Amino acid sequence: MNNPPDSIPEKLQFPCPSCSSTLQVPVSARGKQAQCPHCSGVVNIPAADQATAATTSTPVAPPTMPAPAAASSIPSVTPRASTETSDLYQQIRDEVAKVFVGQDDLVEGTLIAIFSGGHVLIESVPGLGKTLFVRTLGKILGCEFGRIQFTADLMPSDITGAPVFNMKTQEFDFRPGPVFTQLLLADEINRSPAKTHAALLEIMQEKRVTVDGVTHPLDLPFLVLATQNPLESEGTYNLPEAQLDRFMFKLIADYPTEEQEASILAMHGGQTNLDKTLEENIQTLTNPEQINRITAETANVRVDPLLIKYINQIVRLTRSWPQFYMGASPRAGISFIQGIRTLAAFSGRDFATPDDVVQIAKPILRHRVILTAEAEVEGQQIDDLLDQLMRSIEVPRIR
């Protein structure tokens, strides 16, 4: 029997296997794949006899077909559900935007690192507002801020602190260095030699400082936000592989767009005091105790075993990829797990998806792999090779 001219064609109704949301699609889509608009998971649309037929008076758009997976920089995270973590994330983003324009990858990557217990390496030229960003973030998060300007004559004790003789007590007292803070900006870190970099190895991994056999713990959360100039710049050193591996992300900060730069000039072109601006315009939204609690709670975000296998395939393939002289370590896989859990929590989900893995792949891997001499001579780029690597691995279907 034919449908009346004004009726809506019959649709299939079935639950999403990942988030249990009820989906409706046209009958013509049966047997195909689509993307759930609620959890972004890939869904196998059942045959007509496996789904409930539903006639509705309101047209329902079918789920969007997924685009081919490709590794990319961290995009904007749009919370899909209201949770404490997703709401706090959005509030922090809005507060940062009051004084810091653009650089979305930098803002989002840094927030993911903070709530994952990781560190961030930024490659950029001077003058892009990194110090302003860290100071603003410190005010919003209620955390202490510190800055170290790395130079060629900087000594390890200038970072960690050193014993100082007390004339009154006739004893040596430990004087803490600038590393005893919570948000540490290590500016132009690759302008210092390796012996100075070595002072940060224990600090970044163990969150503590050992001087003269005495261990001094650091207050949590603790984030090192290190900047480095492009290696072609004069007076720069390559960072040791052991230190690079301790950074969760390597982010690339580029010049702002024309519109963003015009906004920066209008916002900061006056003779205003930065301390006064932060005090009057920026609101403290959280505190270290809440950050530590949320960081611990992200461990409850579900990561499917197929997703762990997918991450393991990616990390292991970097070690045999023809253009890579050295691949990523198991620490890269751990960073993946921690990062996708935080990314899912920022989106209001209690489960991670393959899209989360793809989104943070390049920031996690680009500083952990080294090109072969032949690939460098040919001018191949690490990000392009990582795109090829990611496309060579089948994306799992999480049910």
Image (spheres, helix red, strand yellow):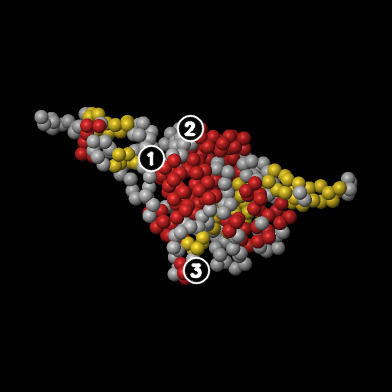
Q: Residue furthest left?
A: 1
| Residue type indicated by callout 1 | Ile
Is residue 10 shown to the viewer in this render? yes
| Position above or below: 316 against 346 | below
| Disc 1 target residue | 398
Q: Residue at x 76, y 49 (%)?
A: 213
| Disc 2 target residue | 83
**Residue 3 placement, left or right of 395:** left
Residue 269, position in %: x, y?
Answer: 55, 53
State the image quarter where residue 65 is shown.
Answer: top left
**Residue 231 placement, left or right of 38:** right
| Residue type indicated by callout 3 | Ala
Q: Residue at x 29, y 31 (%)?
A: 14
Q: CA distance from mark 1 to mark 3?
A: 39 Å
| Disc 3 target residue | 373
Residue 237, position in %: x, y?
Answer: 61, 64
Residue 238, position in %: x, y?
Answer: 59, 63
Residue placed most toward the observer, 64 or 341: 341
Q: CA distance from mark 2 to mark 1?
A: 23 Å
